[in-house]
Image: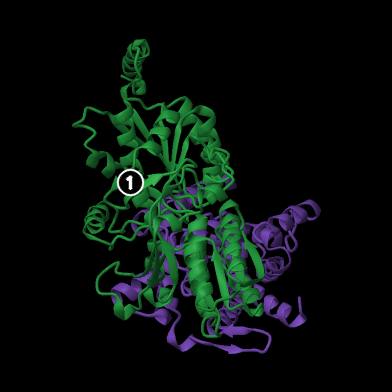
Amino acid sequence: MPTQALFGQLLLGLINGAFYALLSLGLSVIFGLLNIINFTHGAQYMMGAFVAYFLLQWAGLGYWWALVVAPLVVGLFGVVLERTMLQRLYRLDHLYGLLLTFGFALIIQGLFRHQYGSSGLPYSIPSQLAGGHNLGFMFLPNYRAWVVVFSLVVCLGTWYVIERTRLCFYLRAATENPTLTQAFGINVPRMITLTYGFGVGLAALAGVLAAPIYQVNPLMGADLIIVVFAVVVIGGMGSIMGSIITGFTLGVVEGLTKVFYPEASNTVIFVIMALVLLVKPAGLFGRAN
Amino acid sequence: MAVLRNMTAAVALAFAAGGAHAQVSDGVIKIGVLNDQSSLYADLAGQGSVIAARMAVEDFGAAKKGMKVEIVSADHQNKPDVGSAIARQWYDVDKVDVIFDVPNSGVALAVNQITRDKGKALIVSGAATADLSGKACSPNTVHWTYDTWMLANGTGNAIVKTGGDTWFFLTADYAFGHALERDTEAVVLKTGGKVLGKVRHPLNTQDFSSFLLQAQSSKAKIIGLANAGGDTTNAIKQAAEFGIVKGGQNLAGLLVFLTDVHGLGLNNAQGLILTESFYWDYNDQTRAFAKRFAAADRGIHPTMVHAGVYAGVLHYLKAVEALKSDDGTKVIQKMKEIPTDDPLFGKGRIRQDGRKVHPAYLLEVKKPSESKYPWDYYKIRATIPAEQAFRPLDQGDCPLVKK
């Protein structure tokens, strides 16, 4: 394999890593602050892509609108889910939240598949981002470049807000001791609800980003979510920066596997997960309790 | 109730066993449709195949003829172990007499063996591997609709003849992809072409960019997609994104179904060359079938897999009627003796190796401007006569064929 071609593969890995990072970020935010293992994340990612498709079909609103509207719509769906169901599970074992969200994921995917089939629906790349540039070692589509830059900005922005601003202290306090935090006049339940809505919105945002690359398909989140969970486990459950770095890194690792041993490209992440769990059970960036 | 029903069945069985002549076991012909109902092959087969089977039972007039036919269906999730478990359960416990469809060559090969061991019947429509009528051929199996040899010779041949003589394969890494790659490679080499490289990707891959980049740097004129369903549509869509066709390389979708073209949209799919053995808009009979089918299947028009299940059920019931028995091995033998004739594939026959032969069509996907009504997707470029469409009987290494 010539070095030039290898460079192209690294770049592609980084782009795929952007999706892993964005999705695992949402999961980490939700787990870190709500202690819920959100298995509906894949379905919510898929819903984001579908909302983009519906906006175009029914309202004639294109990609840029979808980028704003879809996270809001799906985030709102998340808020309703949290208020009516998840809220009751906080004091119980993780397993209950996992089962509830997993059940919801299956129901949502089943409904969409029943209605829209499994072949997927077409969604085009916005005209402003069509085409691409020849970098010499590879042809880089403009849209992929946009995906990697945009998700990097969103990831770092989220990290900054959650780890480096005043909000961070509120959220931490609310997780550590909700009663005391409430006593300081902070509306803890509302904050938690909004956090869940935000995490879900991130999934939907990733869905909109994915729509022009893949088909808008009811099953698009089903396989991805398992990989993304592996990413979160490797990075350390609940570690924001951990999931961002691991997301991008594992994208690259997977990309390289596609070159050197393509048959193993969808198992390599799980092999790494097993190894990391053996050596560092809390994940690379996680803190053992 | 269940106890009562079982007892009735047992009594009926006792009477049946007492008869001296051949009989339909337990008085019911039970058809099992086994396919992918939830993943990447669910639209091209899935519930549509169940609908097609039901239509065939209706059109055969089973009820009027006093034949009791039941249809059951299950999702094998593209896993050979799941498919095998269902097939065993159906044959051993649920008294299923015949299994239809079974897309995914991996699952089909497993069920092929089980069916043979149990002396039942298997009529394959969805699976592609030509091994089903080659070295894995069985006296209990008919391979109806198409196979990898047919696809390779239809599409592969046409492309090499128009100048596409250097190839790079993107192959789904399981029995089907391997068989399709092998058969196409043989055609390419035979017609003087060259294969510059290949890469095997896992089934149900989302992102093809890395593989496409490898194909791009191979400088092959043709990138052969030896995969199906969602894998093919994702690869085609992303190839456009990476400017592969604009860069002078062409894609050969070796197995593309009508539902894939529908999912891609004509903008992405236009110009693709493909081979199928059935197109809904071929004549009045196929159009009438498509209209009824679409009304029952969310507007989806029938793929060749659906058509194959319909025609297969029709012919199977004819053989059972003639034989007055649903004994798997005997019915399959009878199916081979009676010439086939149905509204979708026309007249044809089933060879000794289990291969159903009929013409195949070399098709081209229309430009958006050429498509006049919904699902108007293909132009017929050539018809490949039945005798040339499939692998010659003596070249498949099928042990059932006497040399």
Residue at 38%, 62% in the rendered image = B259
Q: Secondary structure at mark 1?
A: helix
Is residue A44 or residue B364 the one in the foreground? Answer: B364
The colouring scheme, among rainbow, by chain, secondary structure or one colour, is by chain
How many numbered circles does the render carry?
A: 1
Q: Quadrant of residue B184?
A: bottom right
- Chain colored green: B
Seen in the picture, residue B27 relative to A260 is either above or below; the reply is: above
**Label 1 amino acid?**
Ala
Seen in the picture, residue B350 relative to A157 is either above or below; the reply is: above
- Chain colored purple: A
Q: Is residue B4 left or right of residue B61?
A: right
The chain that hosts pointer 1 is B
Q: Position of residue A240 (x, y in %)?
A: 65, 67
Is residue B329 or residue A111 the one in the foreground? Answer: B329
Circle 1 packing at 10 Å, graded few (<14), some (14-19), many (20+), is many
Residue at 63%, 74% in the rendered image = B215
Is residue A50 or residue B268 the one in the foreground? Answer: B268
Residue at 48%, 71% in the rendered image = B158
Q: Position of residue B72 (x, y in %)?
A: 37, 36
Q: Is residue A96 left or right of residue A281?
A: left
In what quadrant of the picture does the N terminus of chain A appear? Answer: bottom right
Question: Does any portion of residue B70 appear in the rendered image?
Answer: yes
Question: Does any portion of residue A197 appear in the rendered image?
Answer: no
Seen in the picture, residue A30 relative to B143 is either above or below; the reply is: below
Q: Position of residue B185 (x, y in %)?
A: 60, 64
Residue that badge 1 annotates? B311
Q: Position of residue A26 (x, y in %)?
A: 56, 65
Q: Is residue A89 left or right of residue B62?
A: right
